[in-house]
Image (cartoon, grey):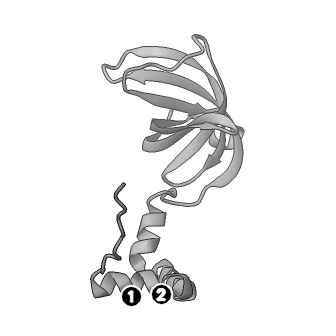
Amino acid sequence: MTTTTETPVELPSGLKRLAATRPADREGNKMVFRAAEKSVEFFDHLRAHYRETRRTAVEIPCEIRIVLNDGSTFDTGTGTVENVSPSGALITRIKIATGCWPAAPFKLMLVLKNEDYKGIVVESVPVRFAHDPAGVGVRFEEIAVQV
C-alpha cells in the first residue's frame, strides 16, 4: 500500500491575495458595483430595455386591419388603445375573426373611433406581444387623417 501526501500548490501572488481577501472584501465589492450603477454605460444598458418615451393611459376604441408585407389583408377586427406615446401604443381587447396572428411579417392599420380622435389612421408595426393585459405593443410608422 502506497500513501501519497499532498503538497500545497502555490498560487501566483495576485490570485493568492484575492482568494485570501475575498470574504473580507465584500463591502469593497459592493462599493465597486454601486459605482458601476452610476456610470453612463450602466444606464445605457438599462435604457435599452425601456420604451423610447413614456406612455399615457387612454381608452380609445379602434378598428384593426392586419396587413401583410405584400399589401394583402390577413384579418380585421377591433381593439382598444390602452396607452399611447409619441412613438407607439399598447393595443388590448383585440378581437379578430381568425383569432390568430400571421406567421409572416405584418403591419397593423388602426382607425381610431373615439369622438376626439375620429378619422385618425395609424400605420404601425408590432414590437412585442403583452400578456398582462393581453395585447400587442406597436411602434408608429405613419399617422394620417381620413377626410
* Foreground pick, 39 / 32: 32
Q: Position of residue 31 (x, y in %)?
A: 53, 87
User: Which residue does the image show at 62% across and 34% down from the upper left?
Assistant: 135
Helix, strand or loop status at disc 2: helix
Q: Position of residue 65 (x, y in %)?
A: 51, 22
Q: Are marks 2 and 1 in contact (CB under 8 Å)?
A: yes
Q: Which residue is mark 1?
A: 17
User: Which residue does the image show at 60% across and 38% down from the upper left?
Assistant: 130
Mark 1 residue type: Arg
The mark found on residue 62 in the picture is none
Q: Is residue 128 above or below residue 106?
A: below
Q: Position of residue 128 (x, y in %)?
A: 51, 39
Q: Which residue is mark 2?
A: 21
Helix, strand or loop status at disc 1: helix
Q: Quadrant of residue 45?
A: bottom left
Mark 2 residue type: Thr
* Foreground pick, 7 / 81: 7
Asked whether, in this view, residue 102 is left or right of residue 9, the answer is: right
Q: Position of residue 43 (x, y in %)?
A: 46, 72
Asked whether, in this view, residue 59 is left or right of residue 66, the answer is: right
Q: Quadrant of residue 54?
A: bottom right
Asked whether, in this view, residue 42 is left or right of residue 59, the answer is: left
